[in-house]
Image: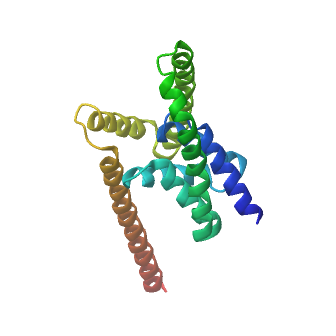
Amino acid sequence: MKAYVDLAIGFARTGVTGYGGGPSTIPLIEYEAVEKYKWVTEEEFGEILALANTLPGPIATKMAAYIGFKVKGNLGATVAILTHIVPSIVAMIFLLGALYTFRQSPIVSGMVQGVTPVIGFMLAEMAYRFFENGRKGLGLSRMLILSIASLIFVEPLGLHPGILIAVFLATAFFIASYKEKEAARANENNMQRKEKSL
């Protein structure tokens, strides 16, 4: 039962405090899933984020579903999704009218402008950590080449990030499969040499 309560509390927090939509919610989900409750490792979270980016629909909801399912199966996924979206829906219904009425208010405008830099910093800090993980896994030169290539494809060329991630995942899969086959072949050759020497 505690796992369901933790899922409910964790994803309710991300839903309520995730001002600005999906991208701003990602660092909050990472904190709950990786740092606080340790449902997934930082590497797993990066993989979940990449996978969620390739699929249609709101990214935060997809991540909630995946993590909830990993923790407690179908019911865990349901709890994570509902507790992530229901508080926001309720708050939106009650507050939308008030915010719409006071949309020209300098106080409301100041609130929006005050929160924006905080969200930008959270996303920059998360991006830096992903960059560091990539540098450790691929090396600095490969990481820079892939980062620059990604920037060119996404920004000037307008390629959807999901397509780029899918291409990278497929490429990594084929490279890993090729290396595995090569290692198996080398191992088989070594065994044959040993048999011949005997």
Is 176 located above or below residue 160 in the figure? below
On the image, the x and y values in percent for residue 111 come to: 57, 20
Quadrant location of residue 149? top left
**Residue ranking furthest to the top:** 106
Q: How many marks?
A: 0
Horizontal placement of 6 versus 95: left or right? right
| Location of residue 189 by image quarter | bottom left
Relative vertical location of residue 21 with respect to residue 173 in this rendering, above or below: above
Question: Where the N terminus falls, by quadrant?
Answer: bottom right
Specify the farthest residue to the left: 157
> In terms of depth relative to the viewer, which is nearer, 152 or 139?
152
Residue that protrudes farthest toward the right in the picture: 2
Locate residue 37 relative to residue 30 in the image: left or right: right
Q: Is residue 62 left or right of residue 168?
A: right
Which of these two is toward me, 63 or 14? 14
Q: Position of residue 166 (x, y in %)?
A: 34, 54
* Residue 58 in picture, x, y percent from top left: 44, 49
Residue drawn at (35%, 37%) of the image: 145
Q: Which of the colour schemes (rainbow, by chain, secondary structure, one colour) is used?
A: rainbow
Q: Is residue 117 visible?
A: yes
Residue at left offset 56%, top offset 34%? 95
| Picture quadrant where residue 176 is located | bottom left
From where the camera sits, is residue 128 visible?
A: no
Image coordinates of residue 142 in percent, x first then y, are 39, 40
Residue at point 51%, 32% (across, down): 97
